[in-house]
Amino acid sequence: MPLSSDQQAEIDALRSETRQTLRATVPGMEAHLYKAYPVLDHGFVRVVDYMGDDAAICQAARVSYGKGTKSVQNDEGLIRYLMRHWHSTPFEMCELKLHVKLPVFVARQWIRHRTANVNEYSARYSILDREFYIPAPENLAAQSVVNNQGRGQALTGEEAARVLEYLKADSTRAYDHYAEMISDEGQQGLARELARMNLPANVYTQWYWKVDLHNLLHFLRLRADTHAQYEIRVYAEEICKLVADWVPFAYKAFEDYRLGAVTMSAQMVDCLRRMIAGEEVTEENCGMSKREWREFMGVVG
Amino acid sequence: MPLSSDQQAEIDALRSETRQTLRATVPGMEAHLYKAYPVLDHGFVRVVDYMGDDAAICQAARVSYGKGTKSVQNDEGLIRYLMRHWHSTPFEMCELKLHVKLPVFVARQWIRHRTANVNEYSARYSILDREFYIPAPENLAAQSVVNNQGRGQALTGEEAARVLEYLKADSTRAYDHYAEMISDEGQQGLARELARMNLPANVYTQWYWKVDLHNLLHFLRLRADTHAQYEIRVYAEEICKLVADWVPFAYKAFEDYRLGAVTMSAQMVDCLRRMIAGEEVTEENCGMSKREWREFMGVVG
Amino acid sequence: MPLSSDQQAEIDALRSETRQTLRATVPGMEAHLYKAYPVLDHGFVRVVDYMGDDAAICQAARVSYGKGTKSVQNDEGLIRYLMRHWHSTPFEMCELKLHVKLPVFVARQWIRHRTANVNEYSARYSILDREFYIPAPENLAAQSVVNNQGRGQALTGEEAARVLEYLKADSTRAYDHYAEMISDEGQQGLARELARMNLPANVYTQWYWKVDLHNLLHFLRLRADTHAQYEIRVYAEEICKLVADWVPFAYKAFEDYRLGAVTMSAQMVDCLRRMIAGEEVTEENCGMSKREWREFMGVVG
Amino acid sequence: MPLSSDQQAEIDALRSETRQTLRATVPGMEAHLYKAYPVLDHGFVRVVDYMGDDAAICQAARVSYGKGTKSVQNDEGLIRYLMRHWHSTPFEMCELKLHVKLPVFVARQWIRHRTANVNEYSARYSILDREFYIPAPENLAAQSVVNNQGRGQALTGEEAARVLEYLKADSTRAYDHYAEMISDEGQQGLARELARMNLPANVYTQWYWKVDLHNLLHFLRLRADTHAQYEIRVYAEEICKLVADWVPFAYKAFEDYRLGAVTMSAQMVDCLRRMIAGEEVTEENCGMSKREWREFMGVVG
């Protein structure tokens, strides 16, 4: 349970106060506001604010004085056209602000997406909580034997037990020492900015993360992908659900033209044409590397 | 008068519909929403949307679960501290979306601020309006004789009259030819993406411009400055008024620590100390170039 | 001929001086350095500096101490893998600096690519040259009747002649008045920052433009595309030639996986599988919009 | 000693091969190329490539065809003017590429500077080395009692000994378990992307970091500052030395107008004027908060 009762009370207070506004609002997103959706064992994602809706994308694309197009149907058609033809700027006109709690090793991947605004909890100034990510047994994966960057089957038996024991014991001991080092009882107390270096990368941190819809979708395309590390993918999948409720037309277009889409190389397109024309195309006569042929077969085979 | 009655009707429609929201709202900003504030002879600035308020800056700085600090006084103190010590990320947590109508030569300066989102009215796709910036007589300035990049006194008499005549006649003729070239009556009609090249840089364009508060304040510091070209400065000044109503604590801190602040070089600080200690510091013994000494005297003299 | 003899002399001086360096160099790029390659009637592109080569991409991808991989063959394989799997950061490790002369309406499209460094010739400070883009007759295209944003066949006969006459006469008159307004002979002289507003968008400007290889390839993908406006496409095509000589492996991968590649939507991939399995897929049973079906047929038909 | 003999051999190989180039070169920087300058106990900074020199800043500011200004003296004057008046784009025309080895907790601060290109050593793909930052005794600082974000005097005696013992023992144990978990001898072996989470934040990582001079100077202003954490400041100071040899005019201007400069608030400037006019200004009549008055006195007192 990631929230203390104080934190839950603060969230409840915010959700109890309704205000009047002239701005675009999205009922589906208002229902999510401030709530903490759990991710991993101690993490969460929660929407702190949002700007714009599907109509705002059209409004900006048309540089119009009022709302987007006259009819909802036109809005959807325009949004699909913009997505298909890589018009990115209208999608930048929507903005999302999230509060995320996540393990440090996930945060280190996440922060590589530079076009976003971030305020992270400062371990120079404040004391981190005693919370560490310990994988569920089914996520305790072995190194992949086919992909240097991936993972294979879950570990089992004694090996799994030993790994879990190491992760738990090392986290606990590291935090005990962290707490002891910064304590000022009967001693000076080590500077927090130094003591934090003893904590392992599965310790939880948290941040406010604000991003426009175009860059958010780019993040989701890479991080909700099956090749992404499981521990960041679960965050991306949770955010996908929020976006689907916030800008449903844009999200559907994103599913069709990005998430579910496939980019074919010049060689692949050539093979496709030959296959559709009835020619038998094989690994030998395809003009691709072994690896590309395998990827190609994975799509059309 | 920059708005057609259709456009005004669209704005009125948006202002007539109030919605419920759980998000942070700012009554002072709600009062501005959608209204077009005139700038120059045909331009305007209007707020299309905003995200956050003063409390949101504190909330992000503290990575808190609820609102910012408990008391309004603490919020102001924290905001002033953040501004004074160049903490930029909490200010990035507020976002503003404007619709701006402006001459092309102003747009060309404005767009150099890269950290913003822009959707400009497309003259490849649409037809530009017959609207050109013609300076008021008091703004028809001569080239400065002391600063290669500035302007001096207003032109007068025949010279002023001739300049105005050129600007008006050339704009009119250019637009007549533009309209004639793209017309498809009795001819094919030149492609819009080509015909636009005949229009001078005082023609009006418009765009949606979205920016976070940190980058907006940076824009305002440079463009509301007395060294900025008058025609962009008037836009910056209009936006300053909106920001003052939106995030009053942040804006006051911006006035004190940026707009009204002065950066002193290492040499200037050294001279200051000597002067305060009672020493007579002169252009000869100050260790600065002539130009720097003049700038220094402009501040403390 | 875009260069004055003074300018050519400066270029010749730079090309005559060889220096020693330990940095990565590319003979194919050294041959291009400083030369001005003509584009349109008065424009050009010239390489002012470059950083890195194909090996530098691999070196960064591996965070290695020395050069990239041991063998040239491995370098190419790695680069193709990185391009295919959207690893962008190693390509950001190469940088190109260009000096470009281009019409203002082309510059206005170009500048929308924000992730680049730009220094433009200042018309607040300096006087622009009397040089305007006047399209060659074969590029004097009509508005497209099928695509609101494109162009159709070239204009002919009287209409073409009239358009050319307008473009030439209006440019000439605008520049005459510009020159007369800023003149300080017998008058004060209008400020340059104001006088420039009388010049049409086909006047030439110039800038230094510096960009990393990843963002450059993104620019080239959009601007060397057949849907890009002809007047910017010719610049992109000229730059493509330079990049092909600078980082040949990366450029070849870019051709295969970007320029010549096709992104298929989820619906298109589904149709492909059905077609390859022998099913007859038609506009009626394909599950796409008319427009998407037409685009799909354009690829595989 | 941070480099293995293999790594040193690779560096030596690169330093032994001189090439011919027409590009701008800087002898002072060529002398640094590829060498690893030690920072902290296992870290280093080394220059992998650079683009431009002082003249390139002027060349871009003037959008010139050849080198910068005719005389070296003019170059320096122009560079100082550009720095003093916050013209940032000419400084963006120089670029630096570094290879840096640094503890993870330093990397996490460093990466917050978003306008840079980064390739980090991948612990999903590769195995991290057994190298941890252990502070020298004089840097084992206590938490500051006046500044929540800073550090005070060095710890001494038993407390210091205990802290060092914890840091060393926990690092060693964490790495032992990391190595044991990923081992595939007699077991499957945990995925590297998971095992890395057991390593504490003082483990060393490394990356290629590429940045333009404007953003580099911004980084140095914040990180070479006395308020920056010691462990990142030593990196900034090492880089300052490299920049001073690379672009000496720009670096000197940076020292005078940024590093050694002071920004005075509107209230401070007002007090200054009163003090210079002979008035006695005190904390009571200064119109500043206690904290600001203390900062002000720190500058002029």
Image (cartoon, coloured by chain):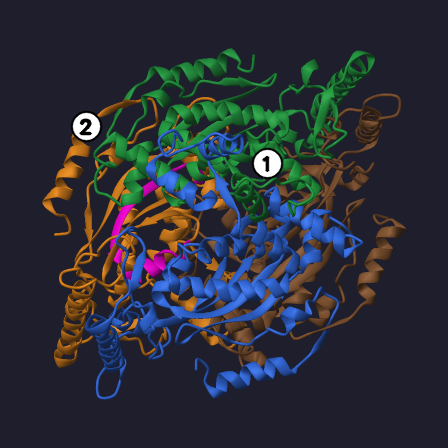
Chain colours: A orange, B green, C brown, D blue
SS state under label 1: loop
Q: Are marks 2 and 1 in contact (CB under 8 Å)?
A: no
Magenta includes A110?
Answer: yes
**Disc 2 element:** loop
Determine the residue located farthest toward the left in the rendered image: A5
In front of the other: C178 or A224: C178
Q: Is residue D206 above or below residue B196?
A: below
- Chain of the residue under label 1: C
Task: Say what amino acid the circle numbered 2 marks.
Answer: Glu
Instruction: Mark 2 vs mark 1: tell me if same chain.
Output: no
Q: Nearer the viewer, residue B112 or C164?
A: B112
Quadrant of the rendered image containing residue B176: top right
The image shows residue D104 at horizontal and vertical percentages of 35, 66
The Cα atoms of the two marked residues, 2 and 1, are separated by 49 Å
Q: Which residues are magenta?
A: A92-113
Q: Where's residue B36, x and y in %?
A: 48, 18
Q: Judge from the rendering whether residue A150 lies leftward or rightward of residue C205; answer left or right.
A: left
Residue drawn at (42%, 46%) of the image: D298
Tell which subunit mark 2 falls on: A
* Residue C65 in sight from this viewpoint: yes
Q: Which mark is residue A14?
A: none
Q: Nearer the viewer, mark 2 or mark 1?
A: 2
Please tell me whether residue B16 belongs to the stretch shown in magenta.
no
The residue carrying mark 1 is: C147
Q: Is residue C28 above or below residue A31?
A: below
Give the residue displayed 42% in from the left and 21% down from the top: B34
Q: Which mark is residue A17?
A: 2
| Residue B148 percent across, percent down from the top left | 74, 35
Query: Badge 1, how many Cα within 10 Å: few under 14, some, many 20+?
Result: few
Q: Residue furthest front?
A: B278
